[in-house]
Image (cartoon, helix red, strand yellow):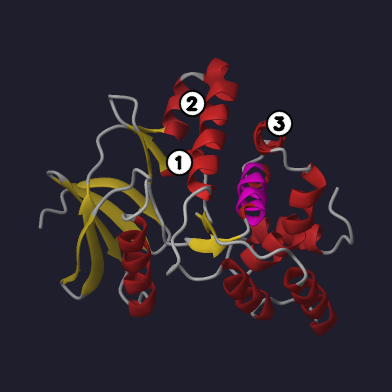
């Protein structure tokens, strides 16, 4: 495989292009189980009505785990927004429409969002009582089985030259309550210091789905806690501030 053309580099992984294929190469020591789970999740999601890159194989390259999948020609929605800032709201509307379509899908073999969040909260640095309160709150939330991305942001949407949107990076995919997925996207806007865009995103999602904002806000502390297991120092400080208030906003 040709690893000369790098597309992007992320924490613990790099993505290369080799002709009509993408190669996601993980750093040495990256969890084998996590690699196989990511590939399995994406393979299962290929059976839905969503546009996602097709998995070709899971392999090792010089001792490094790799997932090989279809290369999608185009630009990320994040790149398009940066090139056309005056159309930001229009593109956020597109993001919302894609997320709603995704939430309308079913994929019964995906891991359950509630179980994943419960486990991650148990791994946080919060005191025992805070963990108990968060997990009790989580246990009382309605249980759904909608496809949730877990990292739904404009950089994970590719728009082809034919204007076809593809959703990429399904490593955090689960099935569960869509409002938890929305809370995660909203937090991503805040973490990127784009509160104004986050507010517009939240407003439009609530309008298009007839979802009360207060309902989504009930998920924000839970999602923030589960996300605090990983992250840099700045993100951790922000997420801890959210968790340590009794009522978000």
* Image: 42 above or below 199: below
Residue topped by disc 1: 155
The 10 Å Cα crowd at callout 1, few under 14, some 14 to 19, many 20 or more, is some
Query: Position of 235 compared to 85: left or right?
Result: right
The residue sitting at 65% across, 33% down in the picture is 208
* Image: 235 above or below 115: above
Is residue 183 magenta-colored? Answer: yes
Of the image marks 1 and 3, the number of the one nearer the N terminus: 1
Marks 1 and 2 sit apart, C-alpha to C-alpha, by 11 Å
- Tag in front: 1 or 2: 1
Query: Residue 163 at x, y = what percent?
Result: 34, 25
Is residue 141 magenta-colored? Answer: no
Residue stretch in magenta: 179-189
| Front position in the image: 165 or 32 | 165
Q: Residue 196 carries which label?
A: 3
Marks 2 and 3 sit apart, C-alpha to C-alpha, by 15 Å
Quadrant where the N terminus lies? Answer: bottom left
Query: Residue 220 at x, y = what percent?
Result: 73, 55
Give yes or no for contact between labels 2 and 3 (Cβ–Cβ under 8 Å): no
Query: Position of 108 compared to 103: left or right?
Result: left
| Front position in the image: 114 or 31 | 114
Residue topped by disc 2: 82
């Amino acid at each position: 495989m040709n690893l000369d053309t790098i597309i992007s580099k992320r924490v613990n992984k790099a993505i290369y292009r080799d002709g009509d294929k993408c190669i996601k190469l993980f750093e040495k020591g990256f969890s084998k189980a996590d690699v196989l789970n990511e590939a399995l999740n994406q393979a299962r999601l290929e059976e839905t009505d969503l546009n996602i890159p097709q998995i070709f194989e899971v392999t090792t390259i010089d001792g490094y785990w790799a997932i090989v999948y279809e290369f999608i020609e185009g630009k990320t929605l994040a790149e398009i927004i940066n090139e056309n800032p005056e159309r930001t709201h229009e593109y956020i509307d597109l993001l919302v429409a894609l997320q709603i379509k995704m939430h309308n899908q079913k994929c019964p073999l995906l891991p359950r969002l509630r179980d994943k969040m419960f486990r991650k909260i148990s791994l946080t640095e919060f005191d025992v009582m805070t963990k108990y309160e968060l997990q009790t709150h989580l246990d009382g939330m309605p249980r759904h089985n909608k496809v949730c991305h877990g990292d739904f942001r404009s950089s994970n949407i590719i728009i082809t030259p034919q204007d076809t949107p593809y959703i990429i990076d399904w490593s955090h995919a689960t099935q569960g309550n869509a409002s938890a997925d929305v809370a995660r996207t909203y937090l991503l806007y805040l973490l990127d210091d784009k509160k104004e865009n986050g507010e517009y995103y939240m407003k439009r999602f609530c309008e298009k789905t007839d979802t009360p904002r207060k309902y989504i806000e009930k998920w924000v502390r839970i999602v923030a806690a589960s996300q605090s297991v990983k992250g840099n120092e700045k993100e951790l400080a922000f997420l801890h501030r959210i968790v340590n208030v009794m009522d978000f906003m």
